[in-house]
Image (cartoon, grey):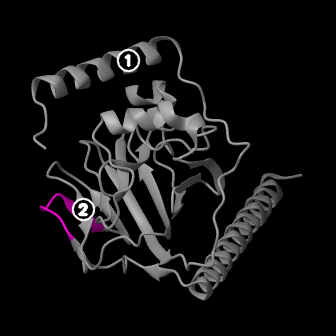
Amino acid sequence: MNISKKRICIFLVLTSSLCSGLVAATYALVVDVAATQDLVAEEAALGFIPLFDGKSFSGWEHDGNWEIQNGTFARVRGGGSLTYTKSTVPDDFALRFEWKVSKGGNSGVYYRPAQYEYQILDNVHSPYGDNPRQAAGSLFFCMAPSKDATKPFGQWNSGRVKCKGTVIEHWVNNERVLSFDYTDPKWADMVKLLKIRGADLTARGGRLWLQDHGQDVWFRRLRWRELPSDESVAADLKFVPMPVTGQALSKEQERVRRMLDAQNRNPQKP
């Protein structure tokens, strides 16, 4: 085969590979768009209401440290949380959102008053990731998730929160990783941790807010729906949180001791 024929063959192979790649990428994009459209239609039928239009801060307040980038809320500098102000969080609700963090990033979604936080974290590179009760998907400083279902930093994760009465559920990437009733005596020690931190688990009617913890974080596709009275949510009796052991447990115990000491020095007035 002469050089010209070799060049033609190589060109045809490369062209064929490129076309195949473009077809595959286009097909994947079409499938992804179709799946998203189906999901939006399904959620609309369930009564989900979008909280973010992807273009503006309508209904949200912040101190200038958040920007809108390609349809996302982006924390770009220090300054405080991003708070939804159109209405308070329903007492019983389902919340869905997507999030990603920078390397070592830390944030959270606060959905009820007094320390109800769905933890957002790069579990691998943040020191908080050593303690499952502070890992992504946890009810921060209270209940650890059953597993680490997160994707690496810089990739999008989906999150869900569902609350009905005293039952709390957290989801990460379509996996339910937390499901418990905070009045169940077997969780009393975990619930006590949150109370020491200042929580009132009976509190309702707070604002939804996205935490600025000092690292860059992105959110998109925030939506919620109020759960009707006839929609039941039962805690998963087989739920087992990841254990907190070793140095992580020692650090947690020391933190609790400091909080209790501070409370004893500065008791709250009745």
Q: Nearer the viewer, mark 2 or mark 1?
A: 1
Q: Residue placed farthest to the front in the image?
A: 270
Residue 91 place in picture, x, y as percent: 42, 69
The relative height of residue 119 versus residue 208 in the rendered view (above or below) is above
What residue is rendered at 53% in x and 16% in y? 245
Residue 25 place in picture, x, y as percent: 67, 67
- Going by the numbered disc 1, the residue's amino acid type is Gln
Label 1 sits on a secondary structure element that is helix
Dot 1: few (<14), some (14–19), or many (≥20) neighbours within 10 Å? few
Observer-nearest of 88 and 119: 88
Displayed quadrant of residue 81: bottom left
Observer-nearest of 74 and 226: 226
Identify the residue position indicated by label 1 in the image: 253
Q: Residue placed farthest to the right in the image?
A: 1
Label 2 sits on a secondary structure element that is strand
What residue is rendered at 89% in x and 52% in y? 1
Displayed quadrant of residue 146: top right
Observer-nearest of 60 and 102: 60
Determine if the magenta segment contains residue 111: no
Question: What are the residue bounds of the magenta stretch?
Answer: 61-68
Residue 132 place in picture, x, y as percent: 51, 31
Identify the residue position indicated by label 2 in the image: 82
Dot 2: few (<14), some (14–19), or many (≥20) neighbours within 10 Å? many
- Going by the numbered disc 2, the residue's amino acid type is Leu
Mark pair 2, 1: CA separation: 31 Å
Quadrant position of the C terminus in the picture = top left
Q: Earlier in the sequence, mark 2 or mark 1?
A: 2
Residue 209 place in picture, x, y as percent: 30, 61
